[in-house]
Every structure is written in C-alpha cells, then in structure tokens.
Amino acid sequence: MAVALPMESNPETMNKYLQKLGVSEKWRMVDVIGLEEDTLSWVPRPVLAVVLLFPLSDAYEQHRSEQEKVLQSKGVEPPKEVFHLKQVLSNVCGTIALVHSVANNMQRIELSDGLLKNYIDEAKNLDASAKGELLENSTAILNAYKEIVRSGNESGGEADETVNNHFVTFVNIDGHLFELDGRKSYPIEHGSTSPDTLLEDAVKVCREFIARDPENIGFNVVALVPNN
C-alpha cells in the first residue's frame, strides 16, 4: 500500500505538484486571503475550483452523517458528469482535492501526457470507490508530492503523523455548484452557480463550514485561477 504525506494549504507547493503531474503553467493555485466581497474581488478570474482546508471535528462528522442518510433515503444517484472519488488512504485528501479540481475542468485545463492524465483517463468510467482504489494504487502520483517536499524547503508532515485537517473542493458543473469531499459517498450539490460567481458561491458554503465550528480557526481557502 502507498503511504502519503499530509499536504499543507500552500499554493507554491501545490503549483509545483500540479506542474509535476502535467498541469499547464497557465493555471495556478492562489490564496484567498479573506472571505469578504471586496477581498474576493482581488482573486483572478475565471476561478475553476475552490479548495477549503478545515479542521475535522465532531460537528463535521455529524453533519456528514446526516447528509449521507438524507441522500441515501432519497435514493440519489451520483451524477455521471461529476468526477468524484472516495478517499481510501489517510493523508491523501490534499491530492484528492487537486485531482477533483483538475478532473472536473478538463475542458479548460491543458494536461500533458503523464501521471495525472493517465489516472483520469483510467478512472473516468469508474464509481467513486473504484476511483479511490485506483488512486491508492497510483503510487507514482503520491510519490511525486513526496519528491517535491523532500527536494525543496517545503514543509511536509511525516507520513505516519495524525492529521486533523481535511480538504474539500468546489467546482461548477453545468451551472451547478458541487462540493467534492473524499470522505463523502456523494458529490453534494449546493444550488446554481456560474463561471463568474463560482468563488462567491463556494465561499457561502465555506462560511457554513466555519459557522458549524465557530471555536476553530484552522480554515484556509485557495483557488485555481489563470496564471496572468
């Protein structure tokens, strides 16, 4: 079994990782330094994906469980047009967040032949659990992150350390805002959105995460944007 290093919400390291996986330098992750309207206006557009880092907590687990029960009771089928994978390994949620960001924007992102393109091509017709198992077996993808951390000055946790933070991704699929969380069985739809309003719409949901854990301060938001 592959062993993954926990990822930090560090755009510089994320960008090195994305480029190593074959993502064009035309796109990059940037910090969203505040969730207020005037601060959001500084983020380059169009925003292709929004990634939230947050502390795992009892409030999150309870909300996740309730969401799953509601969706299961309704017999909801995961939408086929959304690329969503379940997390199998610990410490791999950062990689999953980046995969979700890229795989759901293949019509916009230039992805060269290599590790990530091969994975997405092999995984696209699999269900979420099988996608997760395929990533678990894609040791080259996970090792690429280790190489970046260990070859530079980037900080990275030890593979066996307990990590209490988690990443989720927000994307626009055919005018619908989807939350993609490797710990959830389904993509979570949060209503309508557009290429112009994805950031603002995703931030509304990020605020809900924060409101459920008002005592925690470990929230961070980054966005996938043009490298202007």
Image (cartoon, rainbow, N blue to C red):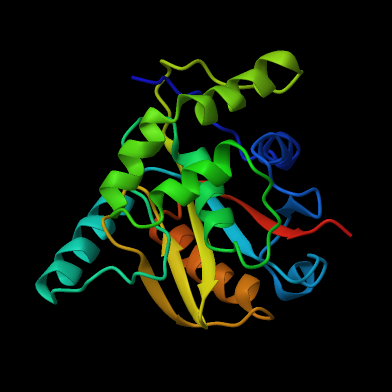
Quadrant holding the C terminus:
bottom right
Camera-nearest residue between 143 and 121:
121
Q: Which of 166/104 is in front?
A: 104
- What residue sits 74% from the left and 71% below the top? 46
Q: Is residue 75 above or below residue 6?
A: below
Q: Residue 82: in sight, yes or no? A: yes
Find the residue positioned furthest to the left.
73
* Residue 126: image location, x then y, percent: 31, 53
- Residue beneath the point at 58% across and 54% down: 102
Report how many numbered discs are placed on residues in the image.
Answer: 0
Q: Is residue 43 left or right of residue 205?
A: right
Task: Name the spot of residue 68 as percent of width and height, x first.
Answer: 20, 62
Q: Is residue 181 left or right of residue 148?
A: left
Give the percent coordinates (x, y) of residue 214.
45, 55
Looking at the picture, tell me which residue is in the foreground, 9 or 139: 139
Please state if 151 lies on the left or on the right of 3 as rendered: right
Residue 112 drawn at (x, y percent):
69, 46
Which quadrant of the rendered structure holds the N terminus?
A: top left
Relative to 134, residue 171 above or below: below
Visible in this render: residue 87? Answer: no
Q: Quadrant of residue 146?
A: top right
Residue sitting at 48 percent across and 49 percent down?
A: 120
Vertical relation: 122 (above or below) 207: above
